[in-house]
Each structure stands twice: as structure tokens, then as C-alpha cells.
Image: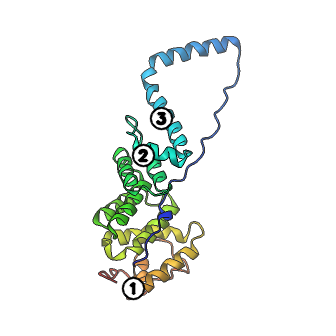
Amino acid sequence: MTDAIPANDVVTRTRKAPGPNGKPSGGTHTGMAGRVLLWAGVLTAGILTLAPVANFISSQISDTSLAQASDETIREKLAERPPKSAPADYYETLGELALQIKPQQREASLRLMKQAVAVDPSRAFAWSNIAWLETEAAGRATPDAAKALTASMDACPLCDLGLVRWRFSFVLAHWNEMPESVRRAAFDQADILRWRGDNTEFLAAMRVKATAAGIPYDTYRNSVKTPVRTPDLGPAPAAQTGAAPETGAP
């Protein structure tokens, strides 16, 4: 399938606002004094343990400020050397923002996304963005793009429905360039879209586009190993049960 994934479809992470801090209950002066002494001892003994917590809080503040920065500030940040021991969130956030300012900074974004996964290989969204950026740069889904997509699938098989939809669409759009293992994984993971969320129209559109491009959509779909069988899928045809899906150029 030759449909390109537009730039504004690059996946971004869903952020949740931090919850309110809990307020400790009051007590007697004696109890409070005892707690003060206790906490003083704990803090003295565990000051080194608290250092990573302080670093984490600092990184979250930096990450939030970065997400709210102006285009000019983002460009300045792109030109700067990253903070020492910058967390993966910093690289990924700045990489996402680089794609949202005009003109887009795709080379910088790719570099930052790669830095994010180097710090934390479990960054599924960053891996997917690497796949998209590698494809955009080459004009086709390269082996490196397929590897990045696989890393995203391994890191987050079903944890985010939006990401599952994006990867499924991406695989169908670059079907001829995708290894068989990636094709199967995309269909296996997209199966969750049938019974979670409102994805009826999305799946119908994917089926129409895939069929028009010569992709054996129903064959792959029926080969998905799932205990869930809904009317939209139906029973697998007897001739196809257990059979390997068609391969090669559609």
C-alpha cells in the first residue's frame, strides 16, 4: 500500500496531570515532636537515597516547562547541548515538539528520539516516531524503520489503543516493505481494537484500503489466534483454518 502517513499523525504520548499532594493530619505537640525527630533521623540516614527522587522531580518540572515552551524557545533548546544526564522524557518531549514547530526539525527529532530510546529502550512512542522519521527520510520503510516499529510493538503491545491504531495503519501503508513477522504482529495486536473502544469505522476503513491495495486482509485477520470471535470477524473459512497467510508483493 502506498498511502503515506501524514506528519500530523506522528504519535505523541498521552500525559496525565499530576494528582494533588496529600495533606498530613495534625496531632499533639508531643506526637509532632516525635515525628520531627524520627524524620530527622530518616533524612540523615537516607539523604543519598533521596537524591534520585530530587532528580526525578527536577526532570518532571523541566519536561513540563518544555512542553509549554514557545516555538522560539524550542528552537533555542534544539541548538543547545542537552542537560547532563538528561532523562528520556526530555529527549522524547523535545523530539515531539521539534515536529510541531514550523518548519519541522525532522533530523533533530530523529536524533532526539534515538537518544530517548538509548536512555530508556521501553519508549514505545519514541520507537514508533523513529520508524516514521526513518521512512520519511528514505521515502520508504527501511529495515531500520521496521526494526524500530518492532521495538515499539515489543515495548507496548496493547498498552495504548491509539498507538496500536497508528502502527496498524503504518504497516498497511508500507506493506510491501514490512517483514512477515511485523505484518503478523500488527494484525495480532490490532485484534484488541475489535472489542475495546469504538473502532468499527477505523477497522472498516483499513479493510477497504488494504483490499484495494491487494493486501490479503481477511486471510491475515482470520489467522489471528484469539479466543474472541465476534460477528464482524466470523468463523474462519475451513480452507483457511490453520493455513499460513499469503506472502509476497500484494
Q: Is residue 194 above or below residue 21?
A: below
**Residue marked by disc 1:** 214
Whichever of callouts 2 and 3 sits on the residue coming sooner in the sequence is 3
Asked which quadrant contains residue 224, the reply is: bottom left
Tell me, for residue 78, which label it has, or none.
Answer: 2
Q: Is residue 56 above or below residue 177?
A: above
Amino acid identity at mark 2: Leu
Amino acid identity at mark 3: Phe
Residue 214's x, y, as percent? 39, 85
At a point 33% along the width and 71% down the height, the residue shown is 178
Q: Residue furthest bottom?
A: 239
Whichever of callouts 1 and 3 sits on the residue coming sooner in the sequence is 3
Judged from the image, the secondary structure of the residue bearing numbered disc 1 is loop
At a point 45% along the width and 20% down the height, the residue shown is 47
Q: Nearer the viewer, mark 2 or mark 3?
A: 2
Of 199 and 106, the residue lying toward us: 106
- Find out whether the residues at labels 2 and 1 contact each other: C-beta distance under 8 Å: no
The alpha-carbon separation of the residues under discs 2 and 1 comes to 42 Å
Please rate how many residues cluster around mark 3, counting C-alpha atoms within 10 Å: few if below 14, some from 14 to 19, many from 20. Answer: few
Tell me, for residue 56, which label it has, or none.
Answer: 3
